[in-house]
């Protein structure tokens, strides 16, 4: 008879070691909590490359700075100093100056961010990271929750589900996840540009959806091409030359002479938000709590804001002597974050629907954007919203900018 290994016991168990789960682990460890993270994926370099790159708004970048990650993440990051969004008629543009910051944010490649987070986690004594550790079930008992892995268990008074859109933690906690799929998918890849991007992030609204060209180091760019789901899958299946020809045909004016410089991956697009972001012995953060249209690059930014708010709420509950997993102990977290998520999701939904509507609607929206862009206070508001710098900011986001 084999004796099962003893369970891992900790203050807080984190399901999922993506960008949100690992940032949360570091933030909690720095506040003195012992954390175990279980991630189904292998450590960086051990699986397929993630073709994504993320715009991290300057407000959320402060979280990396506060956690001492800035130098490491900066090594592979490209500053974004200007943003331009164009409709068929008119558009809006703003520059870093409109936000009062030196940059609007940074573009970070998924692999580079994962490597920096894994290095920091490995150096943190309060974190145990279990890679290739798929959670098979979660039970929420009293006084602790139990996460079952193929070869062991994790016991903790609180589990945070950072396990992405299909979160097992959310499902087993029976927290409703409501929304809809778009009949669209986003093809993400890297392209080499024919001319320097000068730190400009650009977005154009094509008839079937938006296309974004986001600056990366070395005059490369992350291309996000939203299309009907069937077209997106055909774009991934084309050979490299065929893809470049299609890109030139559909958006040649927008990305003249761009050539492929990385794998293509198609991501389904949806809008879903959990009814609550916490419950007895559970909290959700990142894509486990909400998924939104990738237009404007706000999904991970919302997840990082969840992290910053959640650590403040957990600290306050612990200081008050509460059991952090007890029913209601983390209720301020839902109140703090859900409204912001709903507002951002609604804005993305509005853009996505408006710019794929009939031509008169697109023209009117383009004109409205142009008008807003011509009014300096409105432009400043857009810039600070895109920078994740509005509303009640958690302590990790209040640090001074450079
Ligand atoms: C094309 C595209 C472009 C985007 N661009 C941007 C952008 O520019 N800026 C931005 O802010 N956002 C962007 N987003 C959104 C961003 O990618 C997500 O919001 C972000 O990846 C969410 O991170 P996460 O850690 O919550 O979830 P994930 O990245 O999905 O990580 C979840 C983790 O949980 C693990 N996991 C899942 N199930 C289990 C289980 N049962 N047991 C153990 N582990 C498990 C997985 O292995 C994974 O490591 C984009 C999205 C798309 C599709």
Image (cartoon, rainbow, N blue to C red):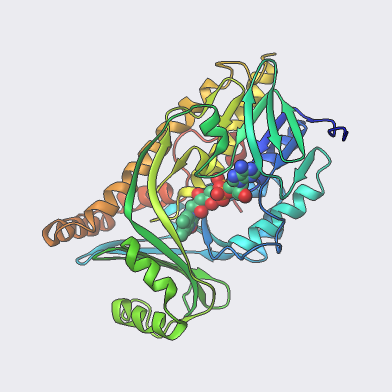
User: Is residue 330 depicted above or below 220 in this figure?
Assistant: above
Name the residue rendered at 43%, 74% in the picture.
Answer: 237
Q: Give the camera-side residue of 154 and 343.
A: 154
Q: Residue furthest front?
A: 1
Examine the rendering and report whether any part of residue 400 can be seen: no
Name the residue rendered at 24%, 58% in the picture.
Answer: 355
Quadrant assignment, res 76:
bottom right
| Quadrant containing the C terminus in the rendered view | bottom right
> Residue 228 at what x, y percent from top left?
31, 62
| Quadrant containing the N terminus in the rendered view | top right
Asked whether, in this view, residue 153 is left or right of residue 380, the answer is right
User: Is residue 251 depicted above or below 185 in this figure?
Assistant: below
Asked whether, in this view, residue 26 is left or right of residue 55, the answer is right
> Residue 384 at what x, y percent from top left?
43, 48
> Residue 70 at what x, y percent from top left?
67, 55
Name the residue rendered at 39%, 67% in the picture.
Answer: 233
Name the residue rendered at 67%, 65% in the picture.
Answer: 75
Q: Residue furthest left?
A: 360
Q: Give the camera-side residue of 44 and 216.
A: 44
Asked whether, in this view, residue 67 is left or right of residue 392, the answer is right
User: Is residue 157 depicted above or below 285 in this figure?
Assistant: above
> Residue 162 at what x, y percent from top left?
59, 40
Quadrant assignment, res 168:
top right
């Amino acid at each position: 008879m084999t004796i099962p290994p003893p369970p891992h016991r900790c203050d807080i168990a984190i399901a999922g070691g993506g960008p949100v789960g690992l940032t949360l682990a570091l933030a909690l460890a720095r506040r003195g909590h012992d954390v175990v993270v279980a991630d189904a994926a292998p450590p960086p370099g051990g699986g397929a490359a993630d073709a994504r790159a993320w715009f991290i708004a300057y407000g959320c970048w402060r979280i990396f700075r506060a956690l001492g990650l800035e130098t490491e993440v900066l090594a592979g990051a490209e500053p974004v100093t200007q943003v331009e969004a164009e409709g068929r008629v008119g558009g809006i543009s703003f520059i870093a100056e409109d936000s009062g910051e030196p940059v609007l944010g940074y573009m970070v490649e998924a692999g580079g961010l994962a490597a920096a987070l894994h290095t920091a986690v490995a150096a943190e004594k309060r974190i145990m990271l279990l890679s290739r550790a798929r959670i098979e079930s979660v039970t929420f008992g009293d006084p602790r929750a139990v996460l079952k892995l193929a070869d062991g268990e994790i016991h903790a008074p609180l589990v945070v589900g950072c396990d992405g859109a299909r979160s097992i933690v959310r499902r087993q906690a029976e927290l409703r996840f409501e929304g809809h799929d778009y009949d669209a998918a986003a093809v993400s890849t890297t392209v080499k540009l024919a001319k320097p991007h000068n730190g400009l992030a650009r977005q154009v609204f094509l008839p079937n959806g938006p296309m974004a060209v986001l600056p990366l180091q070395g005059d490369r760019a992350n291309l996000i091409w939203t299309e009907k789901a069937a077209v997106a899958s055909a774009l991934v299946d084309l050979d490299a030359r065929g893809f470049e020809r299609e890109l030139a045909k559909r958006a040649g004016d927008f990305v003249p002479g761009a050539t492929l410089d990385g794998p293509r991956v198609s991501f389904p697009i949806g809008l879903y938000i959990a009814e609550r972001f916490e419950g007895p012995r559970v909290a959700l953060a990142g894509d486990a709590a909400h998924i939104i249209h990738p237009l404007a690059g706000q999904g991970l930014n919302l997840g990082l804001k969840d992290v910053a708010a959640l650590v403040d709420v957990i600290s306050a509950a612990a200081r008050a002597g509460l059991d952090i997993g007890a029913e209601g102990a983390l209720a301020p977290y839902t109140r703090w974050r859900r409204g912001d998520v709903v507002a951002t999701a609604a804005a993305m939904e509005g853009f996505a629907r408006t710019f794929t509507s009939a031509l008169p609607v697109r023209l009117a929206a383009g004109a409205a954007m142009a008008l807003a862009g011509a009014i300096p206070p409105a432009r400043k508001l857009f810039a600070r919203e895109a920078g994740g710098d509005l509303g009640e900011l958690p302590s990790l986001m209040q640090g001074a900018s450079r």
